[in-house]
């Protein structure tokens, strides 16, 4: 067991306050269980309004952030803005990861890149989820883009609820426990394999994952939870994080 901490780089929108709390919380829980230590290092891209135009402008700063985190010799970097990638069309997470990885190479310390967009679709597929229902904080037009992206990756979206919040700071202030009631009373989950409780890296949901699973009777996923599993996967560590529901507790991917 390594006593040298893994350095985790987080590339986030300037207004994001959630990924830098939820991912470390999950990996601290993992550390307590496994003894594997982590440190966390952030770089920020300017963005306050969640619109397609603002997201694309922000995304141009991602490569510079990856280069800065390479200077800190991070072992893995997570690009934590899901919809900024998804608005660029099907499979955009692959191109984003390539672009940011190239920036780390140019800086002299190549690092694997995890994107929240790719993590969400890849980790749901690995878990065997083929039909999901989801909650998004976005305006309806952005939620439609997220749904199309997920379905383009082979996961059917049975229902999607938009909370229509465009101010990213306000998204970060949404109460996670409200998601439990939304999932239980408003979201159509009939026939679903899982619920995406938060399809956004800024909408807090960590404390609600297990509670919502208990109410809805289905595994509950979030962008942060999927990103955490992808980080662990990139470091070749076991994937189980205790205490946050069955999705995170899975020891390994489902073999197809």
Image (tube, helix red, strand yellow):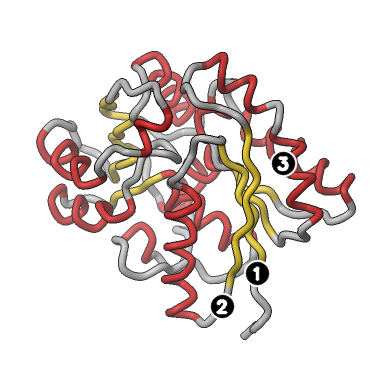
- Going from N to C along the chain, the mark reached first, 2 or 3, is 2
Res. 65 mark: 3
User: As rendered, which of 128 and 207 lies closer to the eye?
Assistant: 207
Left or right? Give the position of 135 relative to 69: left
Image quadrant in which you'd find residue 165:
top left
x and y percent of residue 87 in the render?
Answer: 54, 21
C-beta proximity under 8 Å, tags 2 and 1: yes
User: As rendered, which of 132 and 200 lies closer to the eye?
Assistant: 200
Picture layout, residue 107 above or below residue 88: below
Q: What residue is drawn where x is 50% and y is 35%?
A: 15
User: Residues under labels 2 and 3: Cα distance?
Assistant: 26 Å
Residue at the disc numbered 2: 36
Q: Secondary structure at mark 1?
A: strand
- Going from N to C along the chain, the mark reached first, 1 or 3, is 1
Image quadrant in which you'd find residue 95:
top right
Residue at the disc numbered 1: 6
Q: What residue is drawn where x is 50% and y is 52%?
A: 20
Q: What residue is drawn where x is 29% and y is 49%?
A: 220
User: Residues under labels 1 and 3: Cα distance?
Assistant: 19 Å
Picture layout, residue 130 above or below residue 170: below
């Amino acid at each position: 067991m390594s006593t040298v901490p893994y350095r985790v780089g987080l590339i986030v929108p300037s207004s994001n306050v959630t990924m830098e709390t939820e991912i470390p919380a999950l990996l601290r829980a993992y550390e307590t269980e496994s003894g594997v230590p982590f440190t966390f290092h952030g770089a920020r891209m300017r963005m306050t309004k969640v619109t397609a135009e603002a997201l694309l402008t922000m995304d141009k700063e991602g490569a510079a952030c990856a280069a800065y985190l390479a200077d800190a010799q991070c072992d893995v970097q997570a690009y934590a803005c899901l919809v900024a990638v998804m608005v660029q069309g099907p499979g955009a997470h692959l191109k984003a990861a390539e672009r940011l990885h190239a920036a780390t190479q140019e800086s002299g310390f190549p690092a694997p890149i995890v994107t929240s967009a790719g993590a969400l679709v890849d980790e749901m597929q690995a878990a065997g989820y083929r039909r999901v229902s989801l909650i998004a904080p976005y305006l309806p037009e952005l939620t439609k883009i997220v749904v199309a992206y997920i379905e383009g990756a082979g996961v059917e979206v049975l229902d999607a609820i938009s909370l229509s919040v465009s101010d990213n700071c306000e998204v970060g202030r949404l109460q996670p426990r409200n998601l439990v009631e939304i999932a239980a009373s408003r979201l159509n989950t009939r026939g679903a394999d899982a619920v995406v409780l938060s399809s956004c890296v800024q909408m807090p949901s960590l404390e609600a994952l297990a509670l919502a699973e208990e109410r809805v009777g289905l595994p509950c996923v979030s962008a942060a939870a999927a990103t955490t599993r992808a980080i662990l996967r990139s470091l070749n560590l076991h994937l189980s994080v205790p205490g946050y529901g069955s999705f995170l507790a899975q020891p390994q991917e489902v073999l197809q």
